[in-house]
Amino acid sequence: MELWDDYGIVSYNFGGHGNYIPVSYWVWKNTMNYTKPKLVVIDTYYIEEDSPYRENTQQIHLSTDAFPLSKTKMEMVNDLFGDENSDFHENRNEFLF
């Protein structure tokens, strides 16, 4: 509200606590189905990590469960959990609904 009160800028924080870059990217992609911001700021937390997500996928649920099923959400799940060697490959559909 400070950005709105002080500068008239509409803003919203779609960031998720402790998200790795791939999850932040997919949250951004899903968000673009609803809005077209002039500026997007991506947190580079854990940019050096090779894994697309933490072992605990609660963070991904917190960041993506609010988005309804869509083509973008299906692409996200396939990207993050499509690898057959992924620990969550068999349970990847839980992230769609």
Image (cartoon, rainbow, N blue to C red):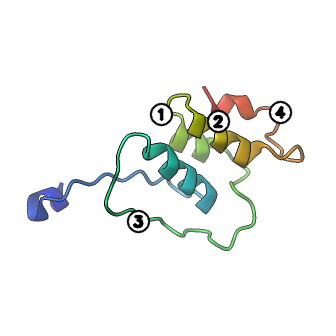
**Residue at the spot of label 1:** 66
Which residue is more in the foreground, 18 or 97?
97
The amino acid beneath tag 3 is: Val
Give the CA separation, mark 4 to mark 2.
15 Å
Q: At 43% from the left edge and 47% from the top edge, which residue is drawn?
A: 32
Give the CA separation, mark 1 to mark 4.
22 Å
Observer-side mark, 1 or 2, equals: 2
Observer-side mark, 4 or 2, equals: 2
**Residue at the spot of label 2:** 74
Question: Could you tell which of marks 1 and 4 lies nearer the N-terminus?
Answer: 1
Q: Check disc 1 and report its element: helix, strand or loop.
A: loop
Residue 73, percent from left and from top: 59, 37
Q: At 83% from the left edge and 33% from the top edge, which residue is drawn?
A: 90
Q: Check disc 3 and report its element: helix, strand or loop.
A: loop
The amino acid beneath tag 4 is: Glu
The quadrant the C terminus occupies is top right
Question: Could you tell which of marks 3 and 2 lies nearer the N-terminus?
Answer: 3
| Disc 2 residue crowd, few under 14, some 14–19, many 20+, Cα 10 Å | some
Q: At 71% from the left edge and 48% from the top edge, which residue is drawn?
A: 80
**Residue at the spot of label 4:** 90
Q: Which mark is residue 41?
A: 3
